[in-house]
Amino acid sequence: MKPLTIEDYLSLPYHIEIIRETVPENPGWVAYVRELPGCITQADNFPELEEMIMDAMRGWLEIALQDGIPIPLPHSDEQYSGKFVIRLPRQLHRQLAEEAERQNVSLNQYINYALAMIIGRVGADLPEPLDPGSLYRLRSTQPHQVREKGQSTGKSDGE
């Protein structure tokens, strides 16, 4: 098998996470590649971020190839079926079902929506402590792939 070139690696679907810096004295954007440790860049504005992260990836890959460092391939989403079983208190089950009925959607649709809102609002970090009522109070104004500085993403075990 022929070794991959830098262009081959750059064409792969690596996961790039984008963070909006909100510190007033140093606003801007940060991007990093989840699968390439230390592959990170920063830009003053969003439009220049794409070019900068591609440049950072190219540099990371060049050094890895020169030094014989193994280059991780992108993580696959295929290991996630889109289904999982969750056990929850009966009272919370009832509250979710009642709210879904009030919203005139299925329980599955409502839970998908609520989980997406939570992830979009706080990355994968849940507010501490999380009470059942907080599920209804969280609202998002940002896409889920962009998060504020200081929020971290949790790791999932897949199921």
Image (tube, rainbow, N blue to C red):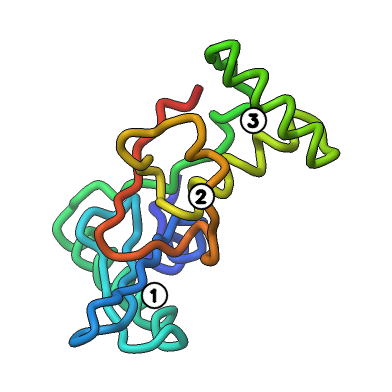
Between the residue at mark 1 and the residue at mark 2, the CA separation in whole angstroms equals 34 Å
Mark 3 vs mark 2, foreground winner is: 2
Quarter-wise, where is residue 155 in the image? top left
Point out which mark residue 82 bears.
Answer: 3
Compute the Cα span from label 3 to label 2.
23 Å
Element type where label 2 sits in the image: loop
Mark toward the start of the polypeptide (3 vs 1): 1
Q: Residue 31 or 154: which is nearer the viewer?
A: 154
Q: In what quadrant of the picture does the N terminus appear?
A: top left
**Residue 112: percent from left, percent from top:** 66, 38
| Residue beneath the point at 34% across and 81% down | 52
Q: Residue at x 54, y 66 (%)?
A: 141
Query: Residue at image x 45%, y 56%?
Result: 14
Camera-near label (3 vs 1) is 3
Which of the 4 quarters of the picture holds residue 26? bottom left
Q: Position of residue 57 (x, y in %)?
A: 33, 68
- Tell me residue 113's x, y (percent): 66, 43
Q: Residues within 10 Å of mark 2 (few under 14, many from 20)?
A: some
Mark nearest the camera among 1 and 2 is: 2
Examine the rendered structure and indicate whether residue 101 appears above or below residue 49. above
Determine which of the numbered discs, if any, sits on residue 54 in the image: 1
